Every structure is written in structure tokens, then in C-alpha cells.
């Protein structure tokens, strides 16, 4: 079985490659790629003229909610959403109920993800760093690593004790796992619900000061520097935090970081009249933060763009602002939003866009993904993007079980239209049938 | 058609004027014992947070307007059983309540309620956000004595950060042409006050200097254990309005307080009971502005209707 993706713009950051060419998939693997490859004995041909052929996208930060909140998302619905959004590999976060802090739960997740109903994408679990994510006792990281976790994180319950964090980092060096850290000093955020700023003062909503994030980013960067533990800072939102990370990288600490589209698209003003769809963690900040963030994306201080896909039941978001949960779904809007707000505006080149959405997160978490090089990944992971496709994001037409999106109704330009993981796992209805030739 | 009273921030000066004039008229009618046309509707009094004065005041206002009040408080309600606010509001809607008066510890909760309730929702205080009827009562009290708010200097003193009274009053006074000052320690002041309509003063003497009106705010004792102030004594020495400090204000300055007063903390007895104090008048006017608010919410002017189609068109040839 040979499938040819023909005549697309190949964007492969792993080879710094941006050329018009073809990709050949043979028996689930990438057999050849480039401007000039033999194309005889082909079974199926997908005409990718005018489209981008990229390594399958990788989202290092997704909440699948299963086990525990299957009304909000399941491994099946979440992986389907991922495939539709252009992702072939996603990392699921451990803040489930019960938390993902032991090997048997890792087995459970990998089992569910491999089931035939699931979306066909790879799920790489992130294990809890401490038992029950309580920040007290380090979890069985070595056993969980054998079961298949790719990183450890206490997610929304960040370890407050610097001593425990230091020991956790030493343990992670020992077992060779990166730590993904949500950075928040809970004594400073202290029940706040939005950015501490001019808007929170008007709305009378308790604010989360930027220092709550920056202090923890700084602490974790310093601990990473001194222990040598690989640290991936999740959800960066302030210019101060970006500055800390820049410094840490300069000092040689093994630190990387990510931002999510909501933080470079919206500001605290979008909260408007207590709109819970704009209640984010960390909170939406200000235009100054966005300006610095765009710069940092451009120069590479920010390594990764992740969706932080956080499904929530509507009864939770239809609540008073301060009682509503933080977060948004994002798997199915991130490509459109990123291309619209970064790529088409010239902030990122197409190649850099794909680097932050695929190659870089794969490298950071050492995943078999993020490249189109033949033989590099066990099976072919490819995403085809139509960069010029204009559409309006409708959260009611998504695979996710939840509807909490701040991007609902937004005009977007760019969309993933084909996703391959070995074989085709998602084809958008906007990928015209005329483009497909089935030889068999 | 019904309309809500969720905040002062969203009212125009004309609407505020309308409410204050209505309040003055209702006051006159009640005092003269005039018959007031009964509204014959049922209003739910939803108090998700303790309140005595606002609740009594709204019940009195409803009573004078011939509205029936139905009480609903957190103790004994379904909220204890885990019902969401949205479901509670929908239930009350289909219990055929016509209006809601709502107090809630969470900022913005009445705005959420208004989305699911088909009828007027009146904010009786939401979190730190707003307390519109308190500001209306204060404005009526000031106008009775000063004639107009235009050009007055109004100093709001105390725990501004946590105060819905401060926010509603600031919006109202500023919209009606007064100069607003926020006075208090840094720890009790919003960190970024740029969008609030007033100037910030961190010391009392300059903050109330030549002020025509002083609105003293209640200091919650928890602020001490929260680490926001040193001791109560330390606060009182710096920010208490007392007979000495009052001299910094204009000689005919009015002193207001939304109650309940911590005597000896934000006010001393001499100030609270002195000639400049209008605190009891605020309480009484609270009833009349709440009558105005209820009436106003139930009587939104009909939007202009399109002119009826000409008859000739309808008649078949």
C-alpha cells in the first residue's frame, strides 16, 4: 500500500526544510519525501497543491478528563478532537479523578487511547509529580515511566514547598523525566479569578497578581539550574515570566516553555461583563504582555504553542465568574488561531509555526514525532494544513464534549484538513474529493 | 417589558436622575400618606449573604408598593443541596416570580441571574462589585441637603478594594458631576485603580481636605487576620473620621456611612452622632430609592413601535 501526498509545500522543521514536493507513505511509514521522489506503483494520491504538508502536530498540554469527568471529555472524544485539530500526538495531564499517579492508571489511559473508537492519535501521559498531586510525597515516577509517562507534573496544584520541588527535580534527573510545571504561588493568587489590574478593580473580582506567576517561574528556573532537571514551564502569561525564562536559558538552565493562543490573542478586557469563557489560568493579562510574548515567540524564547485544552461542563461555566473554572477547549481551534494571529501577520514564518506546534514539543518530551524524515518515527505522522482557508470557528461543531471556548464565532484563516497516523485518521469535509485519486 | 438594575456603572446620568426624582416623589407620597397604585406582583428576595438592613429596606419598599415579597435565603434552600445558581434562578422563574432582589457574595452573580430570569433583577449587593441602591440612597440624602451633586468633592474613605458601596458611589457621584476621591491605606486600595472614576489618596488629611461629602466605609475585622492592616488601633489612628479629622473637610461637609458602623474604628461617636452625620437619613432614604428602583424596573418605557402598516395594503383589491 503506497500513498502519495503530492505537490504540497513541505514544512519540516526537523530538517529546516521548506520546499514544494511530495511525501510517500508506504505501509504506515514515510518511505520518501522531497521535491523529486519516485512515484510509481502508487495506490492513493492526495493532491496537496497549495497546502502545507507538515509533521503531525504535537500538543504537550491536553486535559482528557478521563477518568473522572467523562461528561466533559473522554479519551475517545478528546483524541477525535485532536485528530480533527491536526494533532497526531498529545500529552494528557494527570489532574484526573483519581489523579494519574500510579502505573495502573497509565496502562488504563494507553489502553483506552489505543481502542478502535479513539481518534487514532498517540497519547503520551504525563504523570503526577507527587502522590495525589498534594505536593508532599514524590510519586512512583520510575514505575510510571516504565508504564509510559513522558513527563511529570502536578498541573494546577503546583508544589509550593521549594524543598519538595527540589527533591522532585533531583528524582526526575535520576529517572530521566522532564518536569512540566504550572507556575503559581498560591499564597499570592489566593482565590483570585482574573488578572489583578484595572479591570479587576472595576469588576470587583479578586485579582491574581502577575508576581504569583513570576515568583514561581523564577524559583523553578533556579531549581532547574542547580539540579540540572529538565523543566518545561507551562502557560506563560506575563512579560516578567518571559524575562525570567530568557535569563534562565542564558544561564544555561535546561528550561523550555509554552504559551497558549488565548494568551496572545486576548487581554483582561475581554472578560467584559464577567464572561466566564475568558476565565483562564493564568489569567488573561494586558497588551504589553502580548507584545513581549509575540517578540519572544519570534526570537524563540517561547519554544512551544500548546492548546491547554481544558474541557468544562456547561453548568460549571454558566456560574458566577468567581465560581467558574479556569480554562478553555482548544484542540480544534489552535491551528486556525495560530495561523491567523501569528503566521499570517508575519510574526512567525510557516516553518517556525510548525516548529512550535510539532517539532519542538516532540524534541522536548522526546516523542517519536515532529519529523517527516523517513525512518525517524515508527509510523508516519503527517498533518496537511490549508493555510488560506477562511472559516468561522463554531464550538458547537467540534468533536470535544465541552463547549467552553473563547474563540467561538471568531473568523479564522487556516485549518488542518488531513491527518495521518500510519493511515488517514481524519479528513476534513473541506478537503475536496477532487483532490483524491484512488488507484485501486 | 422589564429591565434590570445591576450596576450604576451602566446607567446614564439621565437614568440616575430619573431614579433619584422617583425616589424623592415616593418619599413625599409616603410621608403624606398618599395612596400609591399597587403593583400586584411577586418579588423574590434572594439573599445568599447575610443582610439585615438592605433586606428590611427592600421589604419595606415592596410593602409600600403593594408588592408581595417571597424570601429565599441560603439556609434551608436547595443551594445547600448543591443546586447551581442557574437552576435556582430557573426554578424561581417557573415558580412565576415577577422580579428578583438579589444579594450574592460573588461579583457579577446578579448579571448571571438576569440572563436566566425573565423579569427584572435588582442587585442588592454582589461581592465587591456594586451595591446600586445604596449609592442611590446616598445620592438622594446628599441632594436633599446640597441641592445637586455637580461640583461637589466626595471622599470615599476606608477599605475601597473590598467595597461594593465604594464602587457604586464612585460611579454615581462621578456620573452626576462630583469629584470623587478614594482615601485609604495602600493595602485596602485596588492595585490598579486607573479605570475607576476617582483620584487616590493614601492619607486622610489630604484626602478629605475641603471635601463636601465624606463617605466612610465599614472596616471588616478579618482584614487584620488577612494581613492587610496592622492592628485595628493602627487603622483607627490613621483613618478614623472623628471630631478632629472632620475639621479638614469643608465646614458644612456631610458624613455618610453605609452601616453597620464599627464605632470607635472608622467613626468615633462624636462624628457618627454629630450634626454633620446623615447616617439615619441614609437608612430612611434607602426605602424610597428602593421603591424607585423596583418601580423603575417594572416600568421600562415601551420601545417605539413601528408605525402600523397602511390599511390600503391589507385590503384586497
Image (spheres, grey):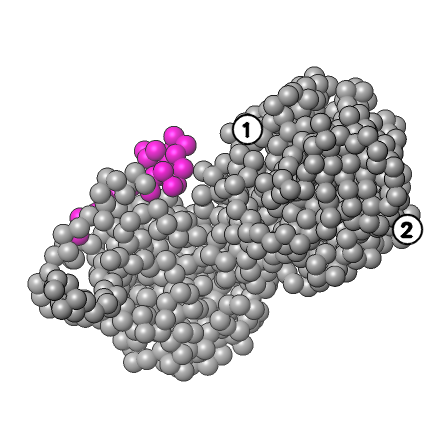
Is A85 situated above or below B262?
above
Callout 2: 10 Å neighbours few (<14), some, many (20+)?
few
Res B289 visible: yes
Q: Which of B196 and A52 is in front in this view?
A: A52
Label at residue A251? 2
Q: Quadrant of residue A299?
A: bottom right
Residue A248: percent from the left, percent from the top?
85, 50
Seen in the image, is A48 located left or right of residue A229? left
Q: Which subunit holds the residue at mark 1?
A: A
Q: Is mark 2 on a helix, strand or loop?
A: loop
Residue B248: percent from the left, percent from the top?
47, 78
At a point 40% along the width and 37% down the height, the residue shown is B84
Residue that label 1 marks: A69
Q: Which subunit holds the residue at mark 2?
A: A
Q: Is mark 1 on a helix, strand or loop?
A: loop
Do marks 1 and 2 share a chain?
yes
Amino acid at each position: 500500500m503506497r500513498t502519495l501526498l503530492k505537490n504540497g509545500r513541505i514544512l519540516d522543521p526537523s530538517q529546516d526544510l521548506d520546499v514544494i514536493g511530495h511525501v510517500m507513505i508506504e505501509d504506515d511509514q514515510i518511505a520518501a519525501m522531497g521535491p523529486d521522489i519516485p512515484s510509481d506503483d502508487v495506490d492513493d494520491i492526495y493532491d496537496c497543491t497549495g497546502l502545507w504538508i507538515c509533521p503531525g502536530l504535537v500538543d504537550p498540554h491536553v486535559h482528557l478528563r478521563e477518568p473522572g469527568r467523562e461528561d466533559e471529555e473522554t479519551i475517545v472524544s478528546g483524541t477525535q478532537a485532536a485528530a480533527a485539530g491536526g494533532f497526531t500526538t498529545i500529552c494528557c495531564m494527570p489532574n484526573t479523578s483519581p489523579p494519574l499517579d500510579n502505573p495502573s492508571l497509565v496502562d488504563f489511559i494507553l489502553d483506552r487511547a489505543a481502542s478502535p473508537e479513539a481518534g487514532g492519535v498517540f497519547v503520551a501521559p504525563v504523570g503526577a509529580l507527587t502522590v495525589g498531586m498534594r505536593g508532599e510525597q514524590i510519586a512512583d515516577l520510575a514505575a510510571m515511566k516504565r508504564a509510559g509517562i513522558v513527563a511529570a507534573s502536578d498541573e494546577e496544584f503546583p508544589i509550593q514547598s521549594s524543598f519538595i520541588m527540589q527533591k522532585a527535580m533531583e528524582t526526575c534527573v535520576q529517572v530521566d523525566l522532564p518536569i512540566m510545571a504550572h507556575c503559581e504561588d498560591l499564597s499570592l493568587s489566593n482565590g483570585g479569578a482574573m488578572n489583578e489590574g484595572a479591570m479587576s478593580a472595576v469588576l470587583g473580582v479578586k485579582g491574581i497578581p502577575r508576581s504569583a506567576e513570576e515568583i514561581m517561574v523564577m524559583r523553578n528556573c533556579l531549581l532547574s539550574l542547580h539540579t540540572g532537571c529538565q523543566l518545561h514551564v507551562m502557560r506563560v502569561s506575563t512579560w516578567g515570566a518571559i524575562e525570567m525564562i530568557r535569563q534562565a536559558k542564558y544561564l544555561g538552565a535546561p528550561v523550555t516553555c509554552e504559551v497558549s493562543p488565548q494568551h496572545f490573542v486576548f487581554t483582561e478586557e475581554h472578560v467584559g461583563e464577567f464572561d466566564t469563557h475568558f476565565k483562564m489560568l493564568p489569567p488573561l493579562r494586558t497588551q504589553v504582555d502580548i507584545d513581549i510574548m509575540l517578540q519572544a515567540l519570534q526570537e524563540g524564547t517561547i519554544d512551544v504553542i500548546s492548546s491547554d485544552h481544558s474541557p468544562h461542563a456547561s453548568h460549571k461555566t454558566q456560574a458566577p465568574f468567581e465560581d467558574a473554572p479556569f480554562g478553555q477547549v482548544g484542540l480544534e481551534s489552535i491551528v486556525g488561531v495560530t495561523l491567523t494571529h501569528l503566521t499570517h501577520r508575519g510574526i512567525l514564518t510557516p516553518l517556525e509555526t510548525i516548529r512550535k506546534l510539532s517539532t519542538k514539543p516532540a524534541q522536548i518530551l522526546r516523542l517519536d514525532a515532529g519529523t517527516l524524515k523517513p525512518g525517524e518515527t515508527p509510523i508516519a505522522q503527517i498533518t496537511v494544513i490549508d493555510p488560506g482557508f477562511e472559516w468561522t470557528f463554531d464550538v458547537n461543531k467540534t468533536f470535544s464534549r465541552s463547549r467552553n471556548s473563547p474563540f467561538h464565532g471568531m473568523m479564522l484563516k487556516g485549518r488542518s484538513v488531513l491527518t495521518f497516523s500510519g493511515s488517514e485518521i481524519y479528513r476534513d469535509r473541506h478537503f475536496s474529493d477532487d483532490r483524491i485519486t484512488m488507484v485501486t | 417589558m422589564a429591565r434590570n438594575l445591576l450596576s450604576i456603572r451602566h446607567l446614564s446620568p439621565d437614568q440616575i436622575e430619573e431614579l433619584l426624582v422617583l425616589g424623592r416623589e415616593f418619599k413625599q407620597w409616603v410621608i403624606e400618606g398618599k395612596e400609591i397604585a399597587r403593583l400586584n406582583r411577586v418579588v423574590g428576595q434572594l439573599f445568599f449573604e447575610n443582610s439585615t438592613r438592605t433586606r428590611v429596606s427592600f421589604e419595606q419598599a415592596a410593602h409600600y408598593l403593594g408588592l408581595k415579597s417571597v424570601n429565599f435565603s441560603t439556609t434551608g434552600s436547595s443551594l445547600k443541596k448543591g443546586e447551581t445558581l442557574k437552576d435556582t434562578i430557573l426554578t424561581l422563574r417557573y415558580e412565576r416570580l415577577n422580579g428578583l432582589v438579589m444579594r450574592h457574595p460573588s461579583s457579577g452573580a446578579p448579571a448571571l441571574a438576569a440572563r436566566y430570569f425573565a423579569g427584572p433583577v435588582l442587585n442588592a449587593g454582589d461581592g465587591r462589585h456594586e451595591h446600586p441602591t445604596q449609592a442611590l440612597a446616598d445620592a438622594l440624602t446628599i441632594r436633599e441637603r446640597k441641592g445637586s451633586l455637580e461640583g461637589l468633592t466626595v471622599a470615599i474613605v476606608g477599605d475601597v478594594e473590598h467595597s461594593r458601596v465604594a464602587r457604586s458611589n464612585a460611579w454615581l457621584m462621578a456620573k452626576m458631576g462630583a469629584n470623587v476621591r478614594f482615601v485609604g491605606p495602600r493595602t485596602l486600595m485596588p492595585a490598579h485603580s486607573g479605570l475607576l472614576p476617582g483620584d487616590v489618596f493614601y492619607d486622610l488629611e489630604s484626602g478629605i481636605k475641603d471635601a463636601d461629602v465624606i463617605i466612610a466605609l465599614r472596616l471588616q475585622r478579618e482584614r487584620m487576620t488577612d494581613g492587610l492592616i496592622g492592628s485595628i488601633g493602627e487603622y483607627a489612628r490613621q483613618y478614623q473620621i472623628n471630631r478632629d479629622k472632620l475639621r479638614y473637610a469643608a465646614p458644612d461637609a456631610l458624613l455618610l456611612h453605609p452601616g453597620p458602623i464599627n464605632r470607635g474604628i472608622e467613626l468615633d461617636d462624636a462624628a457618627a452622632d454629630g450634626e454633620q452625620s446623615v447616617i439615619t437619613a441614609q437608612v430612611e432614604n434607602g426605602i424610597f430609592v428602593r421603591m424607585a428602583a423596583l418601580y423603575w424596573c417594572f416600568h421600562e418605557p415601551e420601545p417605539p413601535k413601528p408605525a402600523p402598516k397602511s390599511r390600503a395594503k391589507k385590503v384586497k383589491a
